[in-house]
Amino acid sequence: MELILKQDVQNLGFKDDLVSVKAGFGRNFLIPQGFAALATPSAKKVLAENLKQRAHKEAKIVDDAKKIAESLKALEIKIFAKTGGEKLFGSITNIDIAEALEKAGNSIERKFITSGIVKRTGKYVANIRLHRDVVVELPYEIVAEK
């Protein structure tokens, strides 16, 4: 079953992508939730026209995302946490990374940050998706509070 995504769906595709899924997944989940619409020939033509018009705007957005990516690469993020030896009391998640970036002057939503759950001190890397074409690896360090 071919569908046109109306919004980003994790592990499937981005908005306005043409995806092929199993009929049950499309009919019972994606379409009723409003995540996708059927890819009829007329819908494909409308999508192609919209993508053509949006191409120029998209180029500016990608350029802005690349500028933000360059500024993020220059950052050194240190997150202070309470520890017992090397082990943390609690954990560090993408929420904590988003807060550290906010303190550094970059506002990035936490849903665009992928880091996993960290429970030890040390150096780690988080992936930040600024755009579908621009993904940045952000190194950060977890340090014990004194």
Image (cartoon, rainbow, N blue to C red):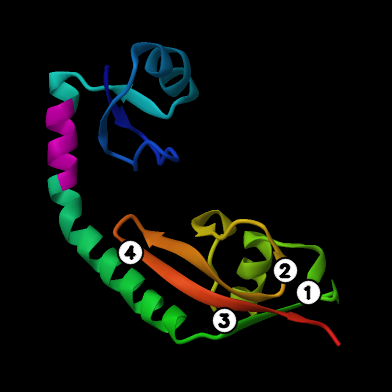
Answer whether residue 22 is magenta in the image: no
Side (left or right) of 68 relative to 16: right
Mark 1 Cα within 10 Å, few/some/many (few <14, many 20+)?
some
> Which residue is depicted at the point 56% across and 60% down?
115
Residue type indicated by callout 4: Val
User: Taken as a whole, is the magenta stretch helix, strand or loop?
Assistant: helix
- Where does the magenta region start and end? 44-51
Residue marked by disc 4: 134
Residues at marks 4 and 2, CA–CA distance in whole angstroms: 29 Å
Q: Position of residue 83 (x, y in %)?
A: 84, 74
Looking at the rendered structure, which numbered label has been put on residue 104?
A: none
Residues at marks 3 and 2, CA–CA distance in whole angstroms: 26 Å
Residues at marks 1 and 3, CA–CA distance in whole angstroms: 29 Å
Looking at the rendered structure, which numbered label has been put on residue 86?
A: 1
SS of the residue at dot 2? strand
Residue type indicated by callout 2: Arg
Up the image or down, 63 lies above or below 37; here it is below
Up the image or down, 73 lies above or below 21; here it is below
